[in-house]
């Protein structure tokens, strides 16, 4: 923290550096630390928070306890579930690591692992990292591989074509097409140089291979990383809040020009003895099949980079001058009393999936937004802008409501009792309301 705040002064204490960071021009807004699931306990969580940690990564690795025992992992899936619960109750962001292709596993077991993690309420993490097992030098797995007791299923022989790495690609395509839209899938391979990999996946562009296969099958990934917008429209006036647009705010646009309407969407799901709400600001244009950066963002980076740099200063001033009106426009969407009453809503769009108890005012907010989420196509009337599950993501907010009585079982931070926890807030620009 000292090195980021200053290069030319003496190092202060951690507490003093944290205070300075609050007023620094370039603030450290998050700190991620990694630990083991069986090391997560109330004492450790208070220590991590003292260090300024906001997100914790834990190596779940697999959900089959027999596989975890075989690789001498030293913890069980129950330890991982407990760790996720403690972290979420304490307002940390949670990043879990999952490893297909481990010794004694196979594609069927790994598919069941991903399915279990997606369906159980006790492993609903905010971020994922998928690390297919790779045989590296000086490891026990290298010894097992040399002895023939372990063979990665990327090396399973096919009589016609030899090795069949598509077993892994097919598994990850199946998984990415099912990842919930409130999860950010940060990685699908470990960043290990190919020369250091003895066996296992050696495709360093595995994610690109997965995107191509998704597109071939007419599918796409809904995770945050794939949907987060890479850049703003060429003309920011073409991005309007849905409510203002529905009220007729389409002045100044020429006939035939379509405005990308921004919609605030809400999704609720059960997670580790609590209710979680994922609020997202999304566009109304479908990204198409495959994955990765939006076509609009790619075109702008490739063709308009010089122009963007030239106008950066003026755009920043414009954004600052419109910040107050932007907040006012967003505020008109939000119902203040989020904790009164209870309602039912599906965990995914369209009401599909398990039904969970959520505050009724939040359900009202969602229904109101969907009802208003229609936009004018200038010269052509109304266009339906019901939230799509493949729309670009402009911002997100995670809220958590712990179940009653949790503070009696676990008193890491008693001051959080009865609070709605904002576990993550992220925006990719400024909305012009």
Image (tube, rainbow, N blue to C red):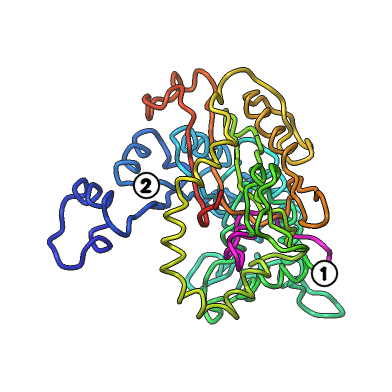
Residues rendered magenta in the picture:
217-237
Q: Which residue is mark 2?
A: 53
Taking the spot 57% from the left edge, 36% from the top edge, the residue there is 332
Q: Could you tell which of marks 1 and 2 lies nearer the N-terminus?
A: 2
Query: Would you identify the image quadrant in which residue 187 lies?
Result: bottom right
Magenta span main SS:
loop
Give x and y (percent) for residue 17: 22, 51
SS for tag 1? Answer: helix
Q: Which residue is mark 1?
A: 216
Between 252 and 130, the residue placed more toward the observer is: 252
Between 13 and 361, the residue placed more toward the observer is: 361
Give x and y (percent) for residue 176: 71, 57
Q: In which quadrant of the rendered image does the N terminus lie?
A: bottom left
Residue 227 included in the magenta stretch of the image: yes
Give x and y (percent) for residue 192: 52, 73
Residue 232 drawn above or below residue 202: above
In the rendered image, the residue lying farthest to the right is 160
Asked if the residues shown at circle 1 and circle 2 are in contact, with their CB atoms under 8 angstroms apart, the answer is no
Taking the spot 49% from the left edge, 43% from the top edge, the residue there is 327
Residue 311 drawn above or below residue 359: below
Between 182 and 188, the residue placed more toward the observer is: 182
Taking the spot 62% from the left edge, 47% from the top edge, the residue there is 241
Query: Would you identify the image quadrant in which residue 92 lies?
Result: top left
Give x and y (percent) for residue 291: 70, 65
SS for tag 2? Answer: loop
Dot 2 alpha-carbon crowd within 10 angstroms: few under 14, some 14 to 19, many 20 or more: some
């Amino acid at each position: 923290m000292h090195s980021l705040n200053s290069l030319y002064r003496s190092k202060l204490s951690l507490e003093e550096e944290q205070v300075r960071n609050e007023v620094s021009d370039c603030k450290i807004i998050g700190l991620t630390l990694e630990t083991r699931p069986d090391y997560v306990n109330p004492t450790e969580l208070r220590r991590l928070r003292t260090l300024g940690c906001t997100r914790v990564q834990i190596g779940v690795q697999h959900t089959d306890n027999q596989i975890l025992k075989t690789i001498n992992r030293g913890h069980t899936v129950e330890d991982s579930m407990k760790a996720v619960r403690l972290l979420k109750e304490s307002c940390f962001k949670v990043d879990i690591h999952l490893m297909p292709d481990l010794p004694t596993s196979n594609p069927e077991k790994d598919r069941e692992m991903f399915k279990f993690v997606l369906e159980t309420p006790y492993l609903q993490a905010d971020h994922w990292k998928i690390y297919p097992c790779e045989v590296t030098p000086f490891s026990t797995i290298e010894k097992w591989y040399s002895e023939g007791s372990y063979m990665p299923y990327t090396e399973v022989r096919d009589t016609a074509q030899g090795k069949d790495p598509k077993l892994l690609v097919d598994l990850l395509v199946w998984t990415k097409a099912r990842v919930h839209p409130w999860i950010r899938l940060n990685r699908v391979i470990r960043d290990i140089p190919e020369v250091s990999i003895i066996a296992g996946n050696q495709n360093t562009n595995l994610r690109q291979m997965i995107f191509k296969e998704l597109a071939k099958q007419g599918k796409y990934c809904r995770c945050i990383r794939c949907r987060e917008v890479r850049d703003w429209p060429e003309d920011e006036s073409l991005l309007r809040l849905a409510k203002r647009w529905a009220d007729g705010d389409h002045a100044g646009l020429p006939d035939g020009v379509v405005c990308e309407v921004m919609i605030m969407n809400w999704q609720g799901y059960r997670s580790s003895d609590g209710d979680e709400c994922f609020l997202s600001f999304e566009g109304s244009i479908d990204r198409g099949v495959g994955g990765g950066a939006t076509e609009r963002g790619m075109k702008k980076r490739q063709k308009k980079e010089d122009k963007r740099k030239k106008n950066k200063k003026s755009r920043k001033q414009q954004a600052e001058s419109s910040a107050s009106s932007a907040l006012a426009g967003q505020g008109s969407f939000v119902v203040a009393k989020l904790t009164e009453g209870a309602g039912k809503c599906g965990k995914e769009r369209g009401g599909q999936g398990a039904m969970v108890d959520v505050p009724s005012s939040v359900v009202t907010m969602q229904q109101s937004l969907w009802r208003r989420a229609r936009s004018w196509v200038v010269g052509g009337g109304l266009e339906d802008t019901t939230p799509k599950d493949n729309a670009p993501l402009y911002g997100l907010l995670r809220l958590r409501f712990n179940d009653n009585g949790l503070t009696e079982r676990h008193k890491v931070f008693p001051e959080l009792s009865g609070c709605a926890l904002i576990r993550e807030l992220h925006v990719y620009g400024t909305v012009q309301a």
